[in-house]
Amino acid sequence: VSILRQVVGTAFKRHYLFLLEPVQGAAFVSLSPERLCKVQGRDLWTEAVAGTWAITEFEKIGEAALLASSAKNNSEHQHVVDYITRLLENVSNHIKVCDTHILKLKHLVHIKQSSTS
């Protein structure tokens, strides 16, 4: 992973680099704009990132208008949030879904919402 961090450098500061090694000698490496999961003690953090627009559209109309502009993107995002919430309900009685905001990347923007349990 440290070699990959050197390769991608600072171009992907807002991305999470992760490696899964299900069996020795086989690995999956990915770079994602969303935190899949962070566990610290008994606390868990995760993010739903779904619903995507071109950065040019965001710059033209702004965040509020963008969020109101697409029932498809909002529905897609809500589906992901609901799915994550159902999964968390299996392991926790204390789930907090945070406010929705825009995740702005170089060429795209996404709807982002964090959850904790």
Image (cartoon, rainbow, N blue to C red):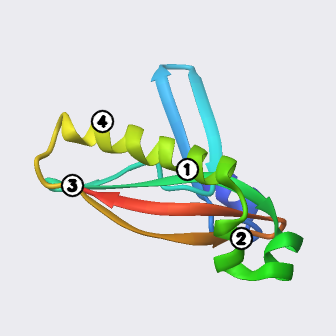
Residue 47 in which image quadrant? bottom left
**Above or below 10: residue 97:** above
Numbered disc 2: secondary structure: helix
- Residues at marks 3 and 4, CA–CA distance in whole angstroms: 11 Å
Q: Is residue 49 above or below residue 89?
A: below
Circle 3 Cα neighbour tier, 10 Å, few/some/many (<14 / 14–19 / ≥20)? some
Camera-side mark, 1 or 4: 1
Q: Are marks 1 and 4 in contact (CB under 8 Å)?
A: no
Q: Residue at x 73, y 69 (%)?
A: 105
Quote the CA–CA distance across marks 2 and 3.
27 Å
Q: Is residue 57 above or below residue 110?
A: below
Q: Is residue 47 left or right of residue 57?
A: left
Q: Secondary structure at mark 4?
A: helix
What's the residue type where badge 2 is placed? Leu
Q: Are marks 1 and 3 in contact (CB under 8 Å)?
A: no
Dot 2 surroundings within 10 Å: few (below 14), some, or many (20 or more)?
A: some
Residue 24 at x, y = what percent?
Answer: 49, 19
**Marks 1 and 3, how far apart at CA:** 18 Å
Distance from Cα at disc 1 to Cα at disc 2: 13 Å
3D distance between C-alphas at marks 4 and 2 = 29 Å
The residue to which callout 3 is attached is 95
- Number of residue marks: 4
Q: Secondary structure at mark 1?
A: helix
Q: CA distance from mark 1 to mark 4?
A: 16 Å
Task: Kindly identify which numbered label has been placed on residue 87.
Answer: 4
Select label 4 or label 2 by which is in front: 2
Residue at mark 1: 77
Mark identifier at residue 66:
2
